[in-house]
Image (spheres, rainbow, N blue to C red):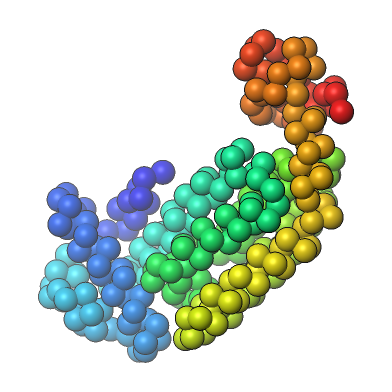
Amino acid sequence: MTDHSHLSRTLRRQPKQQRGKKRVEKILDAAATVFDQVGYEAATTHQIAAQAGTAVGSLYQYFLDKAAIFKAMELRHTERVKAFWAQMSTPEIIQLPLRQMIHALVTAAAELFEQPVSRIVFVQFYTAREIFQSIDESMTQEAIDFLASLLHQRNLALSEARCSLLAEVCVHSSNAVILSALRNPDLAHRQQLMHQIEDLLVSYLGPHIGDSRVENVMNVMICPHCQSSQVNKNGFRRGKQCYLCKDCGKQFLETVCPG
């Protein structure tokens, strides 16, 4: 998914040059600032244009009204979140020691919410749900599914139901702390709250996907035919994870792996 794939569909006019694309991004960031300062209801397109340093006529070239701007912000945030999930779903991240893995997740999330558009969209979702046009509760469920997948990959012995339950607790508790952090004007305290998420998740998940658990998973992920550890996931069969050995080319299910 490119950074402009879905957003481009909401624009009245497609920016063809880099200058136009930068102007659209500037308008979205300006809108985030204005919504933060005066609220969505009180904000006007003239205020947004002034904050962006552009004429209101230029704003209307791309956006029909304030609602269209906010919808574009929703789509921009969604694209960034999905890019974040893809970035965090690599074996290099999943197989890190637990503290390092959680640190990578929390750090990437903090960087995501440093962007004005994502910060405001996240806060507004919990304070003014009625203005949203594309984001709904299904995105929270996607976040739970994303984390549940990571948990299962770290400990294949955990059932899907257990992974989903653990992930649900992690997502909802993390979102509550993130919301508190993003609404706090004190940057230092905001950073402290984000760091507490790391401690919270490490403590909660340690008994289920701690480093000893990862060692067991690594033993499982060995080809039973040639004993190679160079294996890739290759879909599911009969409800079990299937692997493909890169060395011998044979496939196997997790239930027949040694360990």
Image position, residue 13 (x, y; %): 20, 57
Query: Residue at horizontal 68%, vertical 56%?
Result: 99
**Foreground pick, 247 / 174:** 247
Image position, residue 61 (x, y; %): 17, 65
220 vs 98, left or right, is right
Residue 98 drawn above or below residue 63: above
Query: Residue at horizontal 37%, vertical 81%?
Result: 35
Query: Residue at horizontal 47%, vertical 81%?
Result: 187
Q: Quadrant of residue 242?
A: top right
Residue 259 drawn above or below residue 132: above
Position of the C terminus by quadrant: top right
Image position, residue 207 (x, y; %): 84, 55
> Can the viewer see residue 249 in this picture?
yes
Position of the N terminus by quadrant: top left
116 vs 234, left or right, is left
Q: Quadrant of residue 240?
A: top right
Q: Quadrant of residue 10?
A: bottom left
> Can the viewer see residue 238 in this picture?
no
90 vs 235, left or right, is left
Query: Residue at horizontal 19%, vertical 81%?
Result: 50
| Total marks placed | 0
120 vs 234, left or right, is left
